[in-house]
Amino acid sequence: MGASLPPNLNRRDHLSMSLHRTEEQPCHIMGIVNVTPDSFHEQSRRTTAEHAVETALEMWQKGATWIDIGGESTRPNADYVTVEQELQRVIPVITALRLRNATGLISIDTRRPEVARAALDAGADLINDVSGLRDPEMVSLVLERQCGVCIMHMQGDPQSMQEKPSYDDCAVEVSTQLLETARGLVAAGLPAEFIVLDPGIGFGKLLEHNIDLLQRHELFRGIEGFSVLWGVSRKSMIGQITGHDDPNQRLSGTLAVAATAYYQGIDIVRVHDVQEHSDLFKVLHSID
């Protein structure tokens, strides 16, 4: 497992293969590297570029296909980060990683087109936009650069998203919105295989909404067969189910979701704990 570029495979094909499950890689792992002082899981915080780079290199070695670099916390009521601060946090990390690993796959976790463009210039392969491409400039950038994109659903924004979120039919409403955005990209010329859809667990959802989204994941495929990503690692949903308020105690619950993802055909799981997920998938693959 890992992110080396296979022989005789160009980067676009490598990108496409790394966004969709294969027989060899039934569920890809995206390792989270938060270059922030305030992300909800304290142990995931990396406050220096050097520490972030070493963490990412270790994650690749342990089995991550993707490294997701973020410089802005999007937990509920997170502190505001300027564009300049975000750039200062993430670009040195991406630049260093590209020098250290020419073929490793890198995702930039950002809502801002300026940051996304600089990240692509530094060597990132995919834009992971938690705002779901609300900014037309982000749409234009994705189409211009023909890069990978993860479109996530969020009701409201990080400051307001957990203030009485409401849906008539959560899975239908969320999937409809994401598919509409994805199909707009395809109609404008982006290959469908470069698009990943993320239901946005915990982003403007209550526990029943989150469970509904996980149970009805096939709604997100569409006739195009879009890739699906789950980002549930150590989130409050796990704490609500298990009774663990401390994110440090939510690994076992997170692994239960990952095992479900494996058997339900989810393409990518975004996680804090790469080694544990890599071990889990190796064992499941060996006995499947």
Image (cartoon, rainbow, N blue to C red):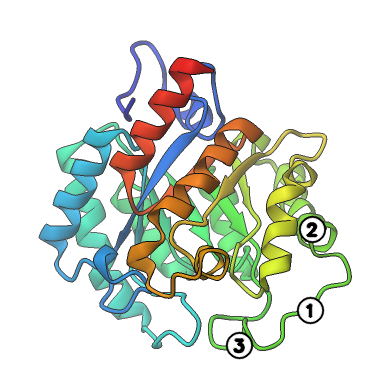
Rate crowding at label 3 as few (under 14), some (14 to 19) or many (20 or more) other CA atoms within 10 Å.
some
Task: Give residue 152's quadrant in the image.
Answer: bottom right
Q: Position of residue 186 (x, y in %)?
A: 72, 42
Quadrant assignment for the C terminus = top right
| Quadrant (top left, top right, bottom left, bottom right) of the N terminus | top left
- Residue 24 visible in the current orientation: no
Residue bearing mark 2:
171
Mark found first going from the N terminus, 1 or 3: 3
Residue 207 at x, y = what percent? 66, 69
Q: Amino acid at mark 1?
A: Ser
Residue lying at 38% horizontally and 68% vertically, measured from the top left: 247
Find residue 166 and name its label: 1
Disc 3 target residue: 160
- Whole-angstrom CA distance, mark 2 to mark 1, is 12 Å
Could you tell me which secondary element the residue under label 1 belongs to?
loop
In this view, the residue farthest toward the top is 8
